Image (cartoon, rainbow, N blue to C red):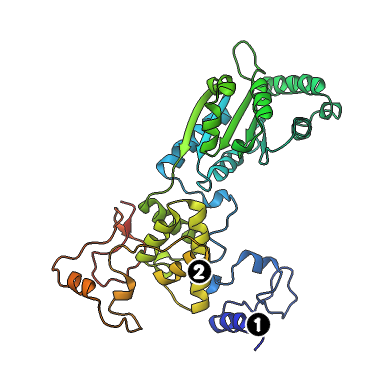
């Protein structure tokens, strides 16, 4: 059997390879795991097996999959306010992978066809000349402004004043700002001086990891820190937020959460990821691949444990009733060790982690009805 045969057999055995012509696909042709049609790129290889129409856990900052915990909701409200009013400097902090870029792109997408114009710098590790060349091009300034800082400042002043008179705002958003060279942070501070006696004409948003806050505490950047008018910080997701995050993405992609992950699996994903959304996405996507390869659903916690070992995330300390001890397991667990046998003799077992709310979202391998995830009161 060739190397591609296992993939082809698994896909054909579950009907995951659609046999219908699609855009860019010759009529009568069949999609294969190596096809490059638009339909195949939209749908992951495990799509049909788990009832998913698109990848639910891509690492791209797609606003369609935005999940708003209380912290994220507060940060998005601050960002909306910052982009809609003349507030000057705004600071957004959060650990890597907590969703800062997704929030920024969501807020920018909401501006729509307004007369405001914002420039997003996603790679701020530029030299001073490159930085001004980039801004001149993105703000639509003259060719001379790309090579002359004097002309750049003059053209930018005229541009933001004209846009403000027309009812729009101008702004600069710097993502990954913790990586910005010191000289560019100082240049940005000086750009914030574009103003009238009553209004800030250039809004500036700095989004970065906690190291950015440490840098702003340096004496040399105290003037920049003093100019920050709005500040918010994103935190990792709690267990119930992680479960709602996973469920929401699965539903948007067309799936049924309870048919894909068990409650114990979700707990394991949260523990291994520490509630970081980007890591949650990586674990969930690879768990779906592993579950599809094993042809199992819902996906058991052992699959997540294998993924964690592959990504060197350490061992998962199981909480509650381990899947290996569930009565419906297909393999023989062997004799019970003395310590475990003693725990089994207790009349009141330790309950697993539970999430508050009303509606069941993820199934549980534990047959006891009370041990389930319930959400959204």
| Closer mark to the observer between disc 2 and disc 1 | 1
**Which of marks 1 and 2 precedes in the sequence?**
1
User: Is residue 50 or residue 148 the one in the foreground?
Assistant: 148
- Left/right of residue 176 with respect to residue 300 in the rendered view: right
**Between 242 and 56, which is closer to the camera in this rendering?**
242
Furthest residue toward right = 144
Instruction: Identify the residue shown where x is 42% and y is 60%.
Output: 269
Q: Quadrant of residue 43?
A: bottom right
C-alpha span from label 2 to label 1: 21 Å
The answer to whether residue 31 is above or below residue 278 is below
Does 93 appear above or below 15? above
- Name the residue at 43% across, 66% down: 256
Give the numbered dot on residue 3. 1
Q: Secondary structure at mark 1?
A: loop
Q: Looking at this view, is 216 or 357 the one in front?
A: 216
Q: Quadrant of the N terminus?
A: bottom right
Q: Position of residue 236 (x, y in %)?
A: 43, 46
Splitting the image into 4 quarters, where does residue 348 fall? bottom left
Q: Where residue 200 sits: x, y (%)?
A: 61, 19
Q: Who's the residue at 68% across and 27% down the image?
A: 183
Can see residue 299?
no
Q: Please identify the residue farthest to the left as the structure is shown.
A: 347
Q: Which residue in the rendered view is the most extreme toward the top?
A: 197
Horizontal side, residue 357 vs residue 90: left or right: left
* Residue to which mark 2 is pinned: 288
Q: Does residue 189 appear left or right of residue 290 in this picture?
A: right
Determine if residue 356 is in view: yes
Q: Position of residue 265 (x, y in %)?
A: 39, 65
């Amino acid at each position: 059997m060739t190397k591609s045969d296992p993939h082809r057999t698994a896909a054909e055995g579950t009907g995951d390879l659609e046999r219908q012509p699609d855009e860019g696909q010759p009529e009568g042709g069949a999609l294969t795991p190596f096809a490059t049609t638009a339909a195949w790129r939209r749908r992951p290889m495990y799509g049909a097996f788990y009832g998913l129409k698109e990848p639910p856990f891509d690492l791209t900052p797609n606003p369609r999959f935005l999940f708003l915990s209380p912290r994220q909701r507060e940060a998005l409200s601050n960002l909306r306010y910052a982009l809609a009013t003349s507030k000057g400097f705004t600071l957004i902090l959060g650990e890597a992978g907590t969703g800062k870029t997704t929030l920024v792109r969501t807020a920018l997408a909401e501006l729509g066809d307004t007369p405001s114009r914002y420039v997003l710098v996603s790679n701020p590790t530029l030299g001073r000349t490159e930085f001004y060349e980039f801004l001149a091009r993105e703000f639509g300034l003259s060719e001379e402004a790309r090579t002359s800082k004097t002309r750049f400042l003059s053209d930018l002043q005229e541009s933001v004043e004209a846009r403000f008179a027309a009812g729009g705002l101008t702004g600069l958003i710097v993502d990954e700002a913790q990586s910005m060279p010191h000289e560019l942070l100082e240049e940005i501070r000086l750009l914030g001086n574009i103003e009238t006696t009553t209004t800030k004409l250039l809004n500036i948003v700095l989004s970065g990891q906690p190291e950015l806050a440490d840098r702003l505490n340096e004496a040399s950047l105290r003037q920049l820190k003093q100019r920050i008018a709005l500040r918010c910080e994103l935190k990792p997701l709690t267990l119930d937020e992680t479960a709602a995050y996973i469920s929401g993405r699965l539903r948007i992609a067309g799936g049924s959460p309870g048919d894909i992950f068990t409650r114990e699996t979700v707990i394991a994903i949260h523990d291994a990821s520490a509630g970081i959304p980007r890591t949650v996405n990586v674990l969930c996507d690879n768990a779906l691949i592993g579950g599809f390869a094993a042809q199992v659903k819902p996906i058991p916690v052992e699959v997540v444990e294998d993924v964690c070992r592959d990504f060197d995330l350490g061992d998962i300390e199981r909480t509650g009733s381990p899947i290996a001890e569930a009565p419906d397991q297909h393999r023989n667990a062997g004799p019970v060790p003395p310590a475990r046998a003693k725990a089994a003799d207790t009349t009141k077992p330790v309950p697993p982690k539970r999430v508050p709310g009303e509606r069941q979202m993820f199934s549980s391998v534990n047959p006891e009805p009370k041990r389930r995830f319930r959400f959204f009161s």
